[in-house]
Image (cartoon, helix red, strand yellow):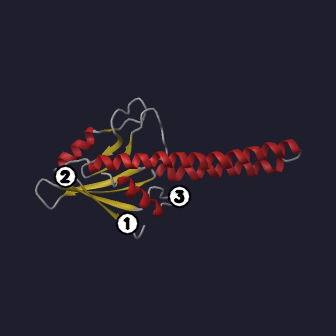
Amino acid sequence: MSDLPKQIQTEADGATLLAPYGKSRYSLELSMSVADLLARLKEDTTSGFGLILRTKPFYGKVGADGFKLRSTRVSTRNSWSPQVTGRVKAGSRENSCLVEFSFDLPTSMKIASPLVFLSFLVVLLALLPELTSPGKAVFLLVQFLFLATIIPLSLYMGMRLGKKDKQHILEYFQNLPGAKLSVQKRLIE
C-alpha cells in the first residue's frame, strides 16, 4: 500500500488536460467471488447526488458485471473528481475475480468545461465593439484577467483534490481480500 503515491506520481507523466488522471489501466486480482465483490461495492455506493446523502465511500452505479464510481467527499463538491470505470469477471482460481478499471474525467466535465470557457470567450468578444470609452475597456480587461486567473486556478484545485480521490479509490481496492494490483500503461487511446 505504501507504493500507491509513487504509482500515482509516476503516472502523472502521462497526464494531459483531457486525461488528468493518467492513461493507465489497472488490473486487480481478488480472493473473493464476483458476486461478493459486486455486493460489497453496492453496499459501499450510494446513488444520491446531494451532499447530505453521501455517507458511503462512493457514489455512482454498480451493475451486474461492472461499475462507474466516484469518491465521496463530505460537504465538498469536486466536479473534476475522477470517475473510475471498471469490469469484473471470474478469476482463474475458484472463488476469485479479476477487476479491470481506469480513471477518467466524467463525460459531463469533458463537455461542460470547454463549453463554459468558450461561452465566456464569446461574451468577451461580443463586448469588444462596445469599447467606446476607456472605462469600458478597463472593465473588459478586468473581466478578462479575472477569467484568465479563476478558470486555471479552479481547474488546478479540482485536479489536486481529484488526485487525492484517486488515491482513496486505489487504497479501497488494494485493501480488499487478497488484492494484487498491477498497472498497465495504455499505448493506444
- Front disc: 2 or 1: 2
Between 133 and 102, the one lying in front of the other is: 102
Q: Which residue is painted at 33% across and 39% down in the image? A: 57
Instruction: Please state which amino acid type lies under the numbered disc 3.
Output: Leu
- 122 vs 53, left or right, is right
Instruction: Please state which amino acid type lies under the numbered disc 2.
Output: Gly
Sequence-wise, which precedes: disc 3 or disc 2? 3
Q: Which residue is painted at 38% across and 67% down in the image? A: 186
Disc 1 is placed on an element classified as strand
- Front disc: 3 or 2: 2
| Label 3 sits on residue | 17
Between 172 and 38, the one lying in front of the other is: 172
- Density class for disc 2 (Cα within 10 Å; few <14, some 14-19, many ≥20) is few
| Label 1 sits on residue | 185
Instruction: Please state which amino acid type lies under the numbered disc 1.
Output: Lys
**Residue 4, percent across and down?**
35, 53
Residue pushed farthest front? 2
Disc ID at residue 156: none
Say whether residue 41 is visible: yes
**Residue 9, percent across and down?**
43, 57
| Label 2 sits on residue | 178
Question: Within the image, what quadrant is residue 49 found in?
Answer: top left
- Density class for disc 1 (Cα within 10 Å; few <14, some 14-19, many ≥20) is few
**Residue 187, percent across and down?**
40, 70
